[in-house]
């Protein structure tokens, strides 16, 4: 079959258009076909031959210059040509260029597979001699609605909407109809598209003038395909409400001391029953490093693919035949489930014991099953090294692979042996294959259940990985293991945050098209239809901290454009390299920091340089050395001295660039430190000018281009709805990129992005955004209300428009008003934490508001153990409360 492609697209001299045909619908493998222009780069044509058995062709166009691709169409939903005409020997298609649409979110699986779930099907077989096929995208349709076409020909119903011709949704939001061209009577065909409702009647006509086509003379066996511009209907944009809760926080009557994938399905049912359409969770990957509660931090994963064994729902597994062990374990899990918080260590030990016994009972049989073999084949690339890592972690008693006596690298021979079912090595690690098989099965079932309930499951992709992880072990080329990722000082932490993650080697990642990230995102899409990019700023620049630092103050943005000594001096600052890059320690500084311990510090930790100026002794000249010296010393005096020494070491005006020692970066938040205090006023003014230019202007264009090297590939890797956590020290370029790529921002009223106001205006939220009241890193709404009474009084008077004294603690009626205001805002998604949803009902919410806190970012040793105090069953039975939630959502216009 011969296909003739025609594209109207204006190029400039030297540019060429290439047709890219996608094998199997994926843009990983494409066949490229050069197109020819017929009128100086405005119209392009290309002919290709396809086998007669071809049912459809997916393709996209790109622009090249001398063999280098300059740009390409949006490839998430490419062009699709259905070849369903039995008598066709020739197909001529007239296309238009498809850029990333403003409403790309409607093409995400969050909408096509959840909110507006409809069954797609191939175009029906057509048996006409001559045919015209119409294709149009109509993303505004909801579940159960269909598209039809009506026009000025009898074959199109003669403008009678009751006779409109039904179309077929053959691709995401794209509808097609094949018409018998021999029935056309007029030289100009006029028509419009209409939405047919669930009752079978016309609901809405598209806006604008009538559409027209001028069919050419069509020969027998020929199909002419018109790809038309998108249909628009006068419908309000979709807005959704939802809940945010970690899976580990879920509680049901039958769970085993921690939320699991079975509880997730139950929570989906509650969300759907109250009119909500989204459920957001925290990361679900395995974080098992030490087998202690310190592994409870969900953002420190040992694998970007493997799921955490704690989420295994034992209820969905076969029953243990050993009745004695079964009784023992069931008694323990009932005991654990009654605890107010998670006992991380006991819960994971319980699930591990159960799975080991079950594996001994039925593992051999499961591993021989066709279902397991299919799972293993599909996931072998990551599953084998993950299982090997877990095996060696437990064998050697540490996840720090650099300390293993052997196997510090993973050889091809080991990978092959552990991937073959006939080897001893396979048997040694097969337990981990077995566990991941069941976890994958349960999570997929939860995802499919959510889709059937029209609920969007939203996942969370952490910005970092653990330096004690599978990826750091087997793919070290992608990471800078001599650095630490974190965040500069913010409302959460005055010393900045040091997450300890290695930073990414973006040069290497970009060299292979970011395949590491693409595979990560595609794995996530098997479980979720939307995701949150944790710390999206990290794709622009990461806050990189020296490996010998504990706090985040000595970090620098990477990549960023450092400043030379001459450039610093050009701002009028008397730059003295040694004095301004080494800790400023004077007698008055020691007295101010340490008080009664100042003399002890002079004698033990610093040494005099001259007069009243000191430097750190070599054995204490980094924060890590100080940390080691004070290990195990937990008295208040020791902690005071240790933290004081940390602050001494970070008391510098500039930090040296990590790659070029002749470039410098102003130290973040140094205006609160002693070296800044010691400057003359004119030097302070010069430094402040330099500081503001550096942090808020200097790197904007540079960071924009850095992000655009990475994010376009990643957001088009899947059809998940892309949301971002864009809080913190946000440069202007972040909004540019997010708008260009249609990424949803995060809007928190108490943390406005405009630094000139205290509270954001909810009515000014952009549509492409997620509105929320608090995140897992923040105090809940009830906690925030009582933290700063002056601040909440101002909020009560200026935002809630009430003139009396603000009530404390936060009453349910006022919490309900705050929630209503958020539901009524323009944001596409309004996702509230479960704690904030429950705050509106004083009879249901947890009496102790402080027990609702999930994380305290300033504490790197925080125990993540919050659990719902209600069971999901009790929540489902709270009819009056659920009716209130449903009513609030309906009144806000959210579906």
Image (cartoon, rainbow, N blue to C red):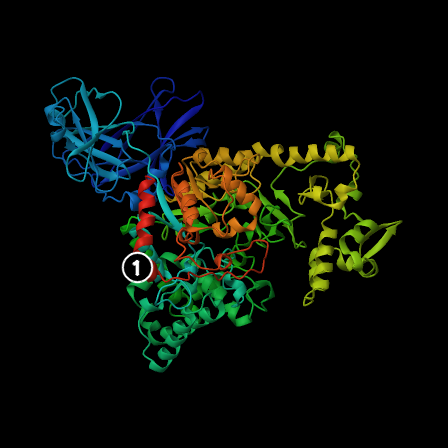
Position of the N terminus, as image quadrant, is top left
Q: Position of residue 804 (x, y in %)?
A: 50, 42
Query: Where 680 sits versus 374, above or below?
Result: above
Q: In which quadrant of the rendered view does residue 187 lie?
A: top left
Taking depth in this image into account, of 719 and 805 the one nearest to the observer is 805
Residue most extreme to the right: 611
Residue at position x 24%, y 43% from top?
118
Q: Position of residue 360 (x, y in %)?
A: 37, 76
Q: Is residue 609 left or right of residue 111?
A: right
Q: How many marks?
A: 1
Q: Is residue 518 visible?
A: no
Position of the C terminus, as image quadrant, is top left
Taking depth in this image into account, of 511 and 122 the one nearest to the observer is 122
Residue at position x 38%, y 45% from top?
720
Residue for badge 1: 877
Q: Is residue 178 left or right of residue 137?
A: left
Q: Secondary structure at mark 1?
A: helix
Q: Position of residue 362 (x, y in %)?
A: 33, 73
Q: Is residue 193 left or right of residue 365?
A: left
Residue most extreme to the bottom: 324
Q: Is residue 439 visible?
A: yes
Q: Position of residue 105 (x, y in %)?
A: 36, 38
Disc 1 crowd rating (10 Å Cα; few below 14, some 14-19, many 20+) is: few
Q: In which quadrant of the rendered view does residue 399 lie?
A: bottom right
């Amino acid at each position: 079959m011969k296909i003739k492609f025609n594209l109207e697209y204006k190029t400039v001299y030297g540019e060429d258009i290439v047709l890219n045909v996608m094998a199997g619908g994926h843009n990983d493998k494409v066949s490229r076909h050069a197109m020819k222009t017929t009128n100086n780069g405005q119209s392009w044509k290309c002919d290709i031959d396809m086998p007669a058995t071809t049912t459809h062709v997916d393709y996209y166009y790109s622009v090249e210059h001398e063999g280098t691709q300059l740009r390409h169409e949006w490839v998430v939903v490419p062009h699709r040509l259905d070849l369903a005409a039995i008598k066709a020997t020739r197909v001529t298609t007239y296309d238009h260029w498809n850029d990333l649409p403003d409403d790309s979110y409607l093409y995400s699986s969050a909408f096509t597979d959840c909110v507006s779930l409809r069954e797609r099907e191939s175009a029906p077989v057509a048996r006409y001699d001559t045919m015209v096929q119409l294709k149009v995208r109509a993303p505004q349709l909801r579940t159960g609605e269909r598209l039809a076409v009506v026009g000025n020909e009898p074959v199109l119903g003669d403008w009678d909407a009751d006779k409109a011709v039904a179309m077929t949704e053959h691709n995401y939001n794209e509808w097609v109809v094949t018409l018998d061209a021999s029935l056309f009577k007029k030289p100009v065909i006029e028509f419009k598209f209409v939405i047919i409702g669930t009752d079978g009647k016309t609901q809405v006509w598209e806006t604008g003038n009538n559409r027209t086509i001028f069919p050419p003379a069509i020969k027998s066996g020929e199909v002419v395909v018109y790809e038309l511009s998108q249909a628009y209907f006068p419908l309000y944009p979709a807005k959704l409400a939802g809940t945010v809760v970690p899976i580990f926080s879920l509680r049901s009557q039958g769970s085993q001391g921690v939320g699991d994938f079975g509880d997730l399905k139950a929570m989906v049912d509650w969300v759907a029953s109250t009119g909500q359409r989204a459920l957001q969770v925290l990361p679900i990957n395995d974080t098992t490093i030490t087998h202690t509660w310190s592994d409870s931090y969900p953002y420190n994963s040992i694998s970007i693919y493997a799921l955490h064994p704690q989420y295994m729902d034992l209820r969905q597994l076969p029953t243990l035949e050993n009745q004695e062990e079964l009784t023992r374990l069931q008694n323990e899990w009932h005991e654990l489930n009654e605890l107010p918080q998670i006992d991380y260590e006991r819960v994971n030990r319980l699930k591990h014991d159960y799975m080991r016994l079950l594996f001994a009972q039925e593992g051999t049989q499961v591993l021989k099953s066709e279902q397991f073999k299919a799972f293993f084949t599909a996931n072998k690339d990551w599953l084998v090294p993950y299982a090997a890592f877990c095996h060696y972690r437990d064998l050697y008693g540490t996840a720090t692979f650099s300390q293993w006596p052997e196997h510090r690298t993973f050889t091809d021979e080991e990978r092959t042996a552990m991937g073959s079912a006939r080897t001893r090595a396979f048997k040694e690690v097969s337990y981990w294959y077995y566990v991941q098989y069941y976890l994958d099965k349960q999570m997929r079932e939860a995802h499919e259940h959510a889709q059937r309930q029209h609920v969007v499951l939203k996942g969370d992709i952490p910005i970092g990985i653990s330096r004690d992880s599978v990826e750091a072990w087997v793919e070290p080329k992608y990471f800078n293991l001599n650095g630490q990722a974190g965040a500069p000082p913010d409302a959460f932490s005055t010393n900045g945050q040091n997450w300890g993650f290695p930073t990414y080697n973006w040069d290497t990642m970009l060299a292979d098209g970011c395949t590491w990230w693409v595979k990560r995102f595609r794995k996530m899409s098997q479980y979720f239809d939307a995701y949150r990019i944790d710390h999206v700023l990290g794709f622009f620049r990461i806050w990189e901290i020296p490996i010998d630092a504990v706090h985040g103050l000595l970090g620098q943005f990477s990549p960023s454009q450092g400043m030379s000594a001459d450039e610093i001096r050009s701002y009028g600052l008397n730059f003295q390299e040694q004095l301004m890059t080494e800790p400023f320690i004077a007698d008055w500084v020691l007295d101010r920091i340490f008080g009664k311990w100042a003399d002890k510090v002079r004698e033990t930790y610093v040494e005099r340089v001259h007069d009243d100026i000191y430097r750190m002794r070599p054995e204490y000249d980094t924060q890590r050395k100080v940390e080691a010296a004070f290990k195990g010393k937990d008295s208040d005096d020791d902690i005071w001295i240790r933290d004081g020494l940390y602050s001494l070491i970070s008391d510098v005006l500039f930090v040296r660039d990590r790659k070029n020692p002749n470039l410098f970066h102003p130290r973040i938040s140094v205006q609160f430190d002693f070296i800044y205090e010691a400057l003359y006023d004119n030097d302070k003014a010069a430094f402040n000018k330099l500081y503001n230019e550096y942090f808020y202007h200097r790197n904007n264009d540079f960071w924009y281009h850095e992000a655009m090297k990475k994010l376009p590939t990643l957001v088009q890797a899947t059809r998940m709805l892309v949301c971002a956590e864009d809080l913190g020290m946000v440069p202007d370029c972040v909004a540019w990129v997010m708008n260009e790529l249609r990424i949803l921002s995060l809007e928190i009223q108490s943390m406005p992005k405009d630094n000139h106001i205290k509270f954001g205006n909810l009515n000014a939220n952009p549509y492409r955004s997620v509105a929320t009241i608090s995140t897992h890193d923040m105090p809940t709404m009830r906690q925030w209300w009582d933290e700063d009474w002056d601040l909440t009084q101002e909020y009560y008077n200026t935002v809630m428009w009430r003139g009396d004294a603000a009530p404390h603690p936060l009453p349910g009626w006022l919490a309900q008003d705050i929630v209503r205001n958020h539901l009524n805002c323009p944001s596409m998604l309004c996702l509230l934490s479960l704690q904030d949803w429950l705050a509106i009902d004083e009879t249901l919410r947890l009496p102790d508001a402080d027990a609702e806190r999930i994380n305290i970012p300033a504490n790197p040793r925080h125990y993540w153990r919050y659990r719902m105090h209600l069971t999901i069953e009790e929540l489902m039975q709270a009819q009056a409360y659920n009716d209130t939630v449903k009513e609030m959502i309906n009144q806000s216009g959210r579906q």
